[in-house]
Amino acid sequence: MVNIRAARVDEFARLAEIELDAFAVWAQACGVTLEPSSAPDFILRQSLDQGLLLVAEDVRERVAGFAAGHATGRYLYIVEVDVETSAQGKGLGRALMLALLDKGSDAGLEQAVLTTDRFAPFNAPFYAKLGFRILEAGEIPPFLQERLDSQISSGLDPERRVAMQMDLHRDVARSL
């Protein structure tokens, strides 16, 4: 049983621990040699202030994952989704995404967008199962293209990075 709830400011340090732990798995799967880092508190705070920072508690009621989003115009931008290594593969990531998509839909946002790795099974293939599709170059909203360009300029492989999008219709997000 997974419990998804709104995050709290006093949990930001725990979210950084989870992100750094998950980074190691992601970096290995994607062939990334960048130094691990976590989202700055102001990014988490923006998500929290918009009601788009969620945590997943494991069966021991311990925070084991989180999802952060930002409302940008008509878009729900998925900033980060991380589950600590020991809790991966147990449905926490899926539960977090579904809850975040519901939040975006409830807020009247029309599309969910994100950037991710094309090949790692827990990245683009995972999001595709939720209803996201890879965007072609001309379809990428400018703010998302800037994010993608920034990731590539920081050293991520441009052949692996993709932007994805899905419609946020209430019935779609809730039926996933």
Image (spheres, grey):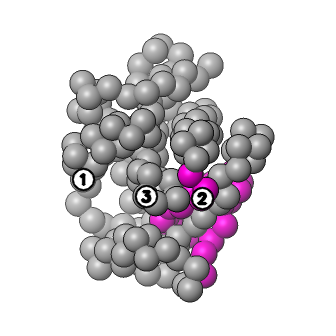
| Mark found first going from the N terminus, 2 or 3 | 3
Give x and y (percent) for residue 87: 50, 32
Give the residue furthest to the bottom: 138
| Mark found first going from the N terminus, 2 or 1 | 1
Question: Separation of disc 3 and disc 1 at Cα?
Answer: 24 Å
Give x and y (percent) for residue 170: 71, 43
Question: Separation of disc 2 and disc 3 at Cα?
Answer: 10 Å
Q: Which residue is mark 1?
A: 37
Name the quadrant containing residue 112. bottom right
| Mark found first going from the N terminus, 3 or 1 | 1
Q: Secondary structure at mark 2?
A: strand
Give the residue furthest to the top: 60
Q: Secondary structure at mark 3?
A: strand
Q: Secondary structure at mark 1?
A: loop
Q: Which mark is residue 72?
A: 3
Magenta stretch, residue numbers: 109-136
Pointer 2: residues within 10 angstroms few (<14), some, or many (20+)?
Answer: many
Closest to the observer, 57 or 5: 5
Q: Horizontally, is 146 left or right of 38 in the view? A: right
Q: Is residue 127 magenta?
A: yes
Quarter occupied by the N terminus = top right
Give x and y (percent) for residue 95: 60, 35
Give x and y (percent) for residue 175: 77, 40
User: Label 2 is placed on what type of residue?
Assistant: Gln
Q: Which residue is mark 2?
A: 111
Q: Residue at x 41, y 51 (%)?
A: 70
Disc 3 + disc 1, Cβ < 8 Å: no
